[in-house]
Amino acid sequence: MSKDNKFMGFLKSFKWKKYINYIIIGGATIVLAILAATGVISDRSDRVLLEKIAISMILATSLSLVVGFLGELSLGHAGFMCVGAYLGGKIAALLAAPLGSGMLTLVISLVVGGLAAGLCGFIIGLPALRLKGDYLAITTLAFGEIVRTIFQNTSAESFGGAMGLPTPIFSDRKYFFVICFVMVLITLFVIQNLIRSKHGRAITAIRDNEIAAKATGINVTKYKLVGFIVAAVFAGFAGVLFSFTASSVQSSSFDYNYSIEMLVIVVLGGMGNINGSLIAAALITFLNTKLQTSLEGDMAVLKDLVYALVLIVIVVYSNSPKLKSFRDKYNLHNLFAKLSKNKHESDDTKRWDVVPTKIKMDALLSTDVVVNDPKPDKPDKAPKDSKEDK
């Protein structure tokens, strides 16, 4: 077999669906880095927007593990981000003098901030994850507010207090958004591989039916804690990246509204849909940032109104039964299938879930069965025994 045939066989057998998000984000990162190197992206506001989008993607992907795959309602994600931002930012401020604010300082700050946030996730999650539903949401929300208040009331020498913690800016700020998107790829790699493993199947089993999961021998408390800690670690990473994008870390940036915004992103992207969470994070962050910069003066009061109206339109489009046929026809799966000219994927008539002759179970059970077999007037005579039988 020639090399060309081997290559074509590899392309046909390659599972594109599993790696399409890596390809898109990696390709977009390379293109944006080239544009920044050539001077096309030279405005600081554009680079800040890209950094915010990458940080929101990390937060949305990590929160999707808890809310979408584990099935637990957490409103304290901003609290874990706050821990990573303050502790990682403090380490960066201490290391900036001897090591500078380069890559080594960033890596050390990421390790410290991620571990600190993961430790807080373990301490809070161990008692909190025995709760369910609204009680867990209230507990995590209280944790986020407690953490924010603690850092807000520290001394100016420790964590800056109400004035905020001064943090160093990354030395090569021009390409810092590239590092942020590399962290997005690392987050995707860890969380997607966790979900596709046997541990991820145990986590989704807990979401589907916790009682059945316990009956099959799954340690529910253990896997809830694992999901909670992993999500907290990556929220801490996002906080450290946030501390390198601003000259100071303010506790007001991590209030409960930010946690609710992340929850809205995960819900809009689809529960348990990582790709949807990534797209929703990019769109919502872009919308929110542009509204803040565009509406100034007296028009600034309309920001929240326009933001809410756009969210309502997105929710109606995603959940309206009347738009279901439109969504099914023009979704990304079908568009990608048409572009790749894959007949098996693009031919909807061969899919079982859209076969027009499919009968619903309730219709089948409600059908009356009538036997139309009248008895004959004269019964058939029994055949005579043959001579062989005699």
Image (cartoon, rainbow, N blue to C red):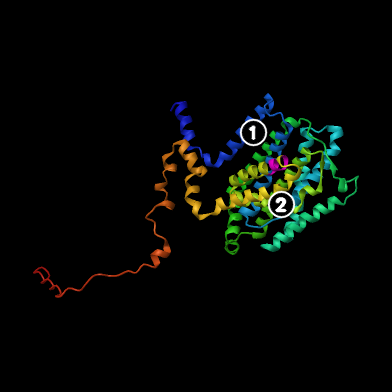
x, y percent for residue 376? 17, 73
Q: What's the residue at 15%, 74% (across, down)? A: 379
Percent position (x, y) of residue 325? 47, 50
Query: Which sits in the foreground, 374 or 127?
Result: 374
Residue 53, by quadrant, is top right
The residue that appears at 76% across and 47% down in the rendered structure is: 115
Which marked residue is nearer to the observer: mark 2 or mark 1?
2
Of 222 and 105, which appears nearest the observer? Answer: 105
Q: Could you tell me the amino acid type at mark 2?
A: Ser
Q: Residues within 10 Å of mark 1 (few under 14, many from 20)?
A: some
The residue carrying mark 1 is 29
3D distance between C-alphas at marks 2 and 1: 27 Å
Q: Is residue 210 above or below residue 284?
A: below
Q: Nearer the viewer, residue 198 or 82?
A: 82
Q: Residue furthest front?
A: 298
Work out which quarter of the rendered image holds the C terminus and state it.
bottom left
How many C-alpha atoms fall within 10 Å of the one at disc 2: few (<14), some, or many (≥20)?
A: many
Instruction: Tell me the tag on residue 259.
Output: 2
Which SS does the magenta portion mostly show? helix
- Span highlighted in magenta in the image: 288-293
First in sequence: mark 2 vs mark 1: 1
Amino acid, disc 1: Thr
Queried whether the magenta region covers residue 356, the answer comes back as: no
Q: Looking at the picture, how far across and down is residue 97, in whole percent?
A: 87, 33
